[in-house]
Amino acid sequence: MTPVTNSRLRVYFGHHKCMTTWDRHVLQRVCNELSWNYVEMNISGSEYVRRNKVDMLSYQDPDMEIVRTLEDFVGFHIIRDPRDIVVSAYFSHLHSHATDNWPELSAYRAKLKNLSKDEGLLWEMEYLRREFEQLYEWDYAQENVLELKMEDVIANPYDQMVRAFLFINAAAENTRLRTKLLDAVARTIRNGRLGYLHRTLSSVVPNYLLPKIPIEVLLMYIYEQRFSEMARGRVQGIEDASSHYRKGVSGDWANHFKPQHKEYFKKNYNDILLKLGYESMLDW
């Protein structure tokens, strides 16, 4: 798969409880470094992007029909085992997810508190139906979108996120490009020769590509968002049900699903697990 290197718009596609908070922190740092106009939206389209001159769009819970209206973009898309989404959403909605920008959550949380854990997990499975439909309806064959699984990002965040930022042409493989750019600007300021800057940029940055984040800086941003830092010293695998960074591991659904949960999930969402490659047989 070859990234579209001349696209003006970069897009991160995420889903609720698929490490969107983590990803947005890294995206914001990168966009601040590159002076990119970064916008977070649940719904968007080409007209909004053009009108607001968006460089980087964070689109959570993407609707495929709206994605098809976006023009000339390159992006990456992160998915997660829907069963783990259920468990993560249950604890997050019950305890840790902020309600500032989601006032409806307060009433939903009150309902969850009146249910047993087993009942709450079943409730979440129905509540998340639209998100699971979006996962199923997504076009996973888009050449301009890099597909990633959260499980792989958790296992190797540095490798996977560098892949993502290289794919959207936002990261530099080394710092030589940035050094030459800074040198060209410095020489222009010192000599007042705009023509020199024009010639240098033409040779160093074909097609006037936007500056890129050095990989070592990107790695630093990823390191700053490591689980132990976000969880205040707790390591992955050690659970704190009240924390937004609850456990940080994959496959935790197996510790919480009982026969009734498996039965409900198989009846309603087995086709999603098969399409996304999380299961290869109906009877798991």
Image (cartoon, grey):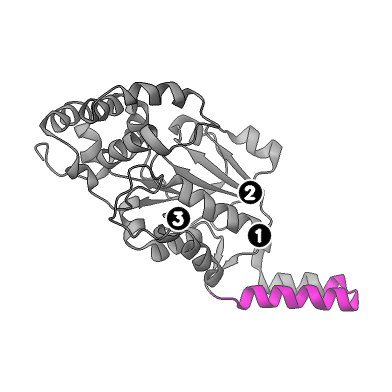
N-terminal-most mark, 1 or 3: 1
N-terminal-most mark, 1 or 2: 1
Of labels 1 and 3, the one closer to you = 3
Q: Which amino acid type is shown beneath numbered disc 1?
A: Leu
Magenta span contains residue 111: no
| Residue at the spot of label 1 | 34
| Residue at the spot of label 3 | 230
Image location of residue 99, percent across then percent down: 50, 31
* Labelled disc at residue 54: none
User: Which residue sits at x=17%, y=31%?
Assistant: 261
Residue lying farthest to the right in this orientation: 192
Left or right, 246 with respect to 120, comes to right
Measured Cα–Cα span from mark 1 to mark 3:
24 Å
N-terminal-most mark, 3 or 2: 2
* Labelled disc at residue 55: 2
Image location of residue 1, percent across then percent down: 40, 57
User: Is disc 3 surrounded by few (<14), some (14 to 19) or many (20+) residues within 10 Å?
Assistant: some
In the image, the segment drawn in magenta is 174-195
Q: Nearer the viewer, residue 27 or 139?
A: 27
Number of dots carrying numbers: 3
